[in-house]
Amino acid sequence: MFDVHLVLLFIGFLLLVCVLLSKFTAKIGVPALLIFLIVGLILDTNQVISSSITNYNMIQSISIFALIIIMFSGGLDTELANIKRVTWEGISLSTVGVFITAIVVGILVHLLFGLGWLDSFLIGSIISSTDAAAVFSIFKTQKLHIKDNLDHMLELESATNDPMAYILVTSVIYLIIHPETSMLLLIFNFFKSLALGLIMGAILGKGFSKLLARIKLSVEGLYPVLLLSAAILSFAATEVVGGNGFLSVYIAAVIIGNCKIKYKYTQLSFFEGIAWIMQIVMFVLLGAFSSIKELIPMLIPAIWIAMILTFVARPIAVLISLAPFDIDRPSKAFVSWAGIKGAVPIVFAFYPLVHGIYNAQMIFDIVMVVTCISVLVQGSTLKFMAGHLKVLKEE
């Protein structure tokens, strides 16, 4: 039986350590998110938590809630005027780019490692999207200001590409379980999910922005609570009707964040703090659920896959996605390098575990290592690459 005081002591100490380490990592240029993952790996609670479907569901549920808060916070900070300038570029990256990344990775994984086609495409789908939490936090902590709205393009891509990756992951899993599934049905569900996500996000965002502007609460501290309900309802209501909740959350947050609401600064600060707590919880938890002993055998294949992703799949995806737009080569190179992975691929890697897919544990371990490599290598060198490619704004 757990002693509640010891549990609280542990949680408080863990939060303190993570916050202090984030200060240290900011100085040496290493993303704090990687440190949170490493802290979780050191805890290695696999010996305490049984590897059962119930636990996979629990971790997945906690991670999804954390992503809701992180994406909502990112949406609130997004200025609509900046997004409008790069809307189509961001959408192209988050749809066409994600699809091409998944296909290229899937083909090369199959050819190099002899893994089955569906398993290979499942790995490609899981690691196909950039991570909003990673991109938002790295841009903030490193104080990156990129010219030609490339930073806004990347933020828009990272915030809106999860729906595409999510649909690809769930579709491949469904095909593995039900090989006879019609492709037309999968395509229909894809467009339905995106359409409902956009519609529900717009409706709920507009509705809550009007409510927040007009309602008079007796306690100022209740306004962030009302905003929190908007985040949760945007996801849950959309998922209930068959739409993509993550897309709805971001759309609603952007609409609310660009409207005049009471105590706006207080609410934005509240959500920024909660978003950081969610990042710490999510990354530590995901790291803790992994096992260093299981990750070590996957190092070599994961490094190869990370190289395929970074130097082959992502550049091809960026070149094709941005081909219709007038963007110079250095900018495309920076966008390619900024395709940072984070918690989202790890969360998606839980789906095969939950559904009992063969090779699910191997896929999870590979994704974990690929994510660590991406955050460490790309995250820590992002500012250097921006300077080298001359895409930093002149101060």
Image (cartoon, rainbow, N blue to C red):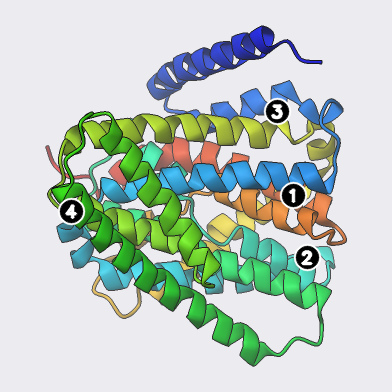
Which residue is at the front of the view, 188 or 228? 228
For marks 3 and 1, the one nearer the N-term is: 3
Labels 3, 2: front one: 3
Q: Are marks 3 and 4 in contact (CB under 8 Å)?
A: no
In the rendered image, the quadrant that contains the N terminus is: top right
Using the rendered view, name the quadrant where residue 116 is placed.
bottom right
* Residue receiving disc 3: 41
Looking at the picture, does residue 32 appear above or below residue 83?
above
Question: Distance from label 1 to label 2 (Cα)?
Answer: 19 Å
**What residue is drawn where x is 35% and y is 37%?**
225
Question: Distance from label 3 to label 1 (Cα)?
Answer: 14 Å
Mark 2 surroundings: few (<14), some (14-19) or many (≥20) residues within 10 A: few
* Residue receiving disc 4: 258
For marks 4 and 2, the one nearer the N-term is: 2
* Residue receiving disc 1: 364
| Whole-percent x, y for residue 352 in the image | 76, 58
Which amino acid lies under the numbered mark 2 shown in the image of this protein?
A: Leu
Whether residue 374 is visible to the viewer of this picture, yes or no, is yes
Labels 3, 4: front one: 4
